[in-house]
Amino acid sequence: MKITKQDRIGIVLFLAPALLLILVFFIVPILSVGVTSFFKWNGITAPEFSGWQNYAKIFSDKVFWRSARNNLIWVAGACLVQVPLALIMAMVLSTKPRGWKIFRTVYFLPQVISGIAIAMLWSAVYNSEFGLLNGLLKLVGQGDSTRNWLGDPKTAFTCVLVYGLFYIGYFMVILMAGISDIDESYYEAATIDGASRLQMEWHITIPLIRYSIMTCVTLAAVYALRTFEQLYLLTNGGPANRTSVLVLYLYNQMRNNNYGGANASSMMLILTGTLVIIVVRRLFAEKKR
Amino acid sequence: MKKLIAFSLAAAIGVLSFTGCSGQTGTASGAGSSQAGQEVTLTFPCIWVGSDSKAKVFGEMVAGFNTEYAGKYQIKLEEQTDYDAYRDKIRTLISTGAAPDLFTVQDFPDLELYASSGKLMNLTDFLAESDMASRFEDGIIERAQIDSANYAMPYESAVVPIMYNQKLLEEAGVTSIPTTYDEFWDACAKLKAKNIFPATQMTSANAWTSMLWYSYALAACGGADVYKNGFDDPAFEKAAEIMVKMFQNTSSDAVGADATVVNGHFFNERAAIYTNGSWILGRIKKEGVQGLYDNLVLAPGLSYDGKNGGAYISTIQAYLVAGKQDDPQKAEAAKAFLRYVSDPERVVELANSSGALFAIKMDASKITDPLQAEIVKQSAAASFMIGHFQGSVPTAVANEFPAALESLVIGDITPAEFVQHLKEVKDSNS
């Protein structure tokens, strides 16, 4: 079909608002972050060009590497645990067992509750003096295992990670929507051929919702890289930066009035995010072939 | 298609250039210049609102000012209840060239940073006027100077006693208030034996109360000049050793605890020893278990190796700052407000209602709260006054303190490495 001049004007008019928003709120800030990452800047006085100094500083900072490592573990956890859990739940609930609507609501409920409230809740669960977890351990005669879960370097990161990965509702709903689009005839044919439920899920459901899975994995990876509020509220990166992540690291740079360093960290975060997304898409592209 | 994209981008940049061209003049951000005879309105993003202990009386002071200067000056409060968000807001406004007409600053390092922007009103001559200069505690105005100029009016002061719950001490068999660290550790051992947390500690947020304990340890180990000597003073390492011991004498949730946890332990008589500014007295009265306030005994700092006992931590907790004004009427309005809120009679009322103390001279006999009056009396008799660690080091060091303290108390680093780390942070951010 040939695009006429009027079509072109229409396309421009439709695209312009979105392009403008992307430009103002995405491209310009990223460019600004990129440029200022080469400056020594306290956010108040005029920036001074400092070349690669900000990058050299963050690369020599152990906390930066620990934060990056934690972020990657979080990404792996989100992609390899959170999404598969959501997939399993979506497949189970899609068979519409008794009470499936209640379960669907219950799993999705945390998505509509304020992150601050949830963090406070988990903070109370993990508290060493009055927390639910230690209370339960004492109740079952495991008083020796009680500890300051969020203050102990051996357990802090696992605790916040578990809390983060626990919330699967959002991905579950996306995957359920994908599953609901699959034509029933595939399953009927498989049933006639004598396929088990597991075989049907493996050979029919998963291949047919792979793009939904890819969306979930991409979103999970991005959310994992952006993780901030729950960590800020639960541990503030502690103890001794054991639970720090890149966003928290750059936030702390800003608190130190080191905006150049914060922006260099932001660029590393953007780069990491881009790489993770490329890897995820490549993995799924191979599956497509 | 390329033309289409080019056109779209050009259009977008065009619109952007219009939206981004609202230039700032580099002066304060209130309503535009006033004309003669017109009421001048000043904006004041204010943290003393909501449940803050100063909110009620300070709000009344602002209302009183607005009534007294009706038709001439008006103060418009912008409520902000979160300290970190407030700090972020002020910093952002100043960095964009739009300093608020009036605002507060908590730390001297922040004040130095903001002053470097050139967006703050120079108050040196105003504060040197005889009726103003005579209002302040001796030397306070000079200590708030940056390159011999005042860019802020010192207002609230933090006077920090060590608070002991006499009832819990007696239950544990501690018969006298410790005056040395050795006596303190003995008291801690007795309290622990009775399943009472000796002292409260925290490492979350700015590790406030633990930062105060470290400040007291620094005063005891290094004396009045410890901050002047810098991190090479061995007192910093000795004080770090004291902090390690402090965390052996606290609740199990201390690492990662925030102010809510710390206050909860002391207010509910789970912990016997606590330190915080005088402003907390109002909350202890209101939120503490029945009788807690009456059981409190206040004391100054402990001595270390028989030296430097009886010190008191005191620092300016809030500076009132005015944004630089092009409009002389607005500048006069800001000064009139500063003069109004620093009136000693009004400040006494604010002190009595909030439990806070101020950099303005007050008649101690007019302070109605007995413990607050005791703090004023004890601090006047202190062997020396010293600032706290957070207000005496650069912002980056103060921000690094909680994580470094956690590393220290969980055994990641030694006291010497703790000091070395803070020193490196200071050097790398200078």
Image: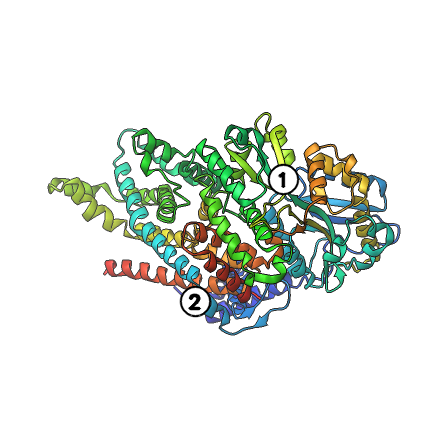
Q: Quadrant of the N terminus of chain B?
A: bottom left
Residue B23, x across and y down, in percent = 69, 63
The amino acid beneath tag 1 is Ala
Q: For the residue carrying disc 2, how many other residues have a C-alpha within 10 Å: few (<14), some (14-19), or many (20+)?
A: few
Q: Residue at x 65, y 34 (%)?
A: B282
Residue pushed farthest right?
B37
SS for dot 1: strand
Q: Quadrant of residue A118?
A: top left
Question: So how many labels did they put on this image?
Answer: 2
Q: Residue furthest left?
A: A194
Above or below for B66 versus A13: above
Looking at the image, residue A199 sits to the left or right of residue B150; the answer is left
Which quadrant would residue B414 be assigned to in this image?
Answer: bottom left
Same subunit, tags 2 and 1? no
Kindly identify which chain the residue marked by label 2 belongs to. Answer: A
Q: Which residue is mark 1?
A: B299
Which residue is label 2 attached to? A59
Query: Which residue occupies the foreground of this view, B108 or A245?
Result: B108
Residue B194 seen by the camera: yes
**Residue in the picture at 31% in, 43% down:** A86
Instruction: Point out the frontmost of discs 2 and 1.
Output: 1
Could you tell me the amino acid type at mark 2?
Phe
Its colouring scheme is rainbow
In the image, A281 versus A243, the foreground residue is A243
Q: Is residue B118 left or right of residue A187?
A: right
Quadrant showing the C terminus of chain B: bottom right
Secondary structure of residue under mark 2? helix
Q: Is residue B96 visible?
A: no
Residue A45 picture location, percent across and down: 64, 66
Residue with the most extreme front position: B306
